[in-house]
Image (cartoon, rainbow, N blue to C red):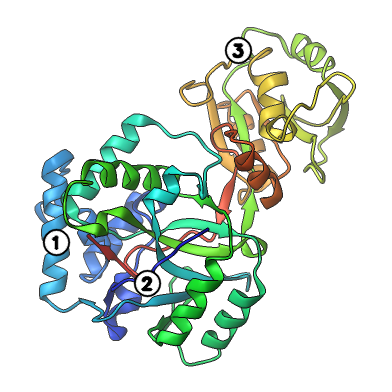
Amino acid sequence: MAKIRPFKAVRPTRDKAHLVVSKSYEYYTEVERTVQMQYNPYSFLHIVNPGYKYDKNITGEQRYKLVRNRYFEFKEEAILQQDTEPCYYVYKIVDPMQEVFSGIIAIASTQEYATDVIKKHENTLQERENTFKEYLKTVGFNAEPVLLTYPDHDTITTLTDRITSQRAEYEFTTPYKDTHYLWKVSDATTIEQLAAAFDTIPTLYIADGHHRSASSYLLAQEMMDTTDNNYQFFLSYLIPESKLRIYEFNRLVKDLNGLSKEEFLIQLDTWFRIKNKGNEVYKPSKPHHFSMYLDGTFYALYLRKNMYEFTDALSELDTQILFKTVLAPILGIQNPRTDTRLEYAHGKHDSLYIKNKVDQGAIAVGFGLFPATATQITKIADQGLKMPPKSTYIEPKLYSGMSIYEF
């Protein structure tokens, strides 16, 4: 059963929360990062990019130590303060399209990660796991939660609705027009009710954050002999499956593997019924349909199901279908994790993004996919299978610094 725990979060003071929280470092352009750090001394970016202070790019162990120094400076200056009692935190985001994401910030067990109470659907890279494990060990905190999901649960929904009917601890809107709310849940009865409700859920699923959770598990194993039990948990944001927003990751390939356009289309015809759409922008409307943009023309590709065998949940996933029928056998991409001929574009980009990349000559062919569903993700995880890389782009994308778990 899923055992999540309350914790004593380190959080921004109410008056500075809107200034402290930041998107993940890689989601900013270089210009955006520079502006943020130049004009906002409270931004969490100053903690994770400590080299800015010295106008120097600092990496490795030296960077990790400076991150820890900046973190303690924020605490010493009372920009960040730690709660005195373990709490759950209800966190709601309303995006510019008025889509609402509401979930619970808590800590989850690395042991349950190991025993598949917390299930995975993506493979991780060992080098990245080890790198982030060393980072966590040095800095001593989690600042960006792993996104976990669970089947909708009436009791949890009722409790969170009751909590969010009260005045929020934080309420602010960012320059990106998304509004953030945080409620601190310190009432012992409510904490017990939430813990008991989660205890009835047999399985949690990682929606986003496979490397972060894997790194936390590695650190927990390394620190097993210490008396500090905090290493046995990792920061999580738990959200019901119905509240996830799942986008596709489209595929862009730099060349046709030595084939002419005509040869390529003939080989595609083995697996797909192909319809020339001309200049009409086509976007798949159902699973096993794909769009393709090649040499100034849009195509609709419909899988010939008499040619393709569905054997398990993974074989039904569109990213796997495209890999098995096109990327590997026709275009020669055997390892989508490392092949530099393959690029990805998440589904928040429209179809014209693919068209522009091809028209500019940087890409030879682009494929648009239909997004996976939460049901597909959980089925794949339940069967112990792993998706190809970049199979899903999942929202909400959480901000760093809203609530920090300190080891």
Kindly state the secondary structure of the residue where label 2 is placed: loop
Could you tell me which quadrant the C terminus lies in? Answer: bottom left
Mark 1 is on which residue type? Arg
Q: Who's the residue at 47% across and 74% down the image?
A: 91
Q: Who's the residue at 66% across and 74% down the image?
A: 154
Front of the two marks 1 and 2: 2
- Gap in Å between the C-alphas at discs 1 and 2? 26 Å
102, 171: nearer the viewer: 102
Q: Who's the residue at 58% across and 65% down the image?
A: 200
| Residue under pointer 1 | 70
Mark 3 is on which residue type? Gly
Counting from the top left corner in percent of width and height, residue 314 is at 68, 33
| Residue under pointer 2 | 6
- Gap in Å between the C-alphas at discs 3 and 1? 47 Å
**Placement of 288 over or under 195, stated as above or below:** above
299, 123: nearer the viewer: 123
Q: Earlier in the sequence, mark 3 or mark 2?
A: 2
Q: Earlier in the sequence, mark 1 or mark 2?
A: 2
Counting from the top left corner in percent of width and height, residue 62 is at 11, 43
Can residue 52 be seen? Answer: no
Kindly state the secondary structure of the residue where label 1 is placed: helix
| Residue under pointer 3 | 332
81, 114: nearer the viewer: 114
Identify the image quadrant of residue 143.
bottom left
**Placement of 343 over or under 26, stated as above or below:** above
Q: Who's the residue at 24% across and 69% down the image?
A: 39
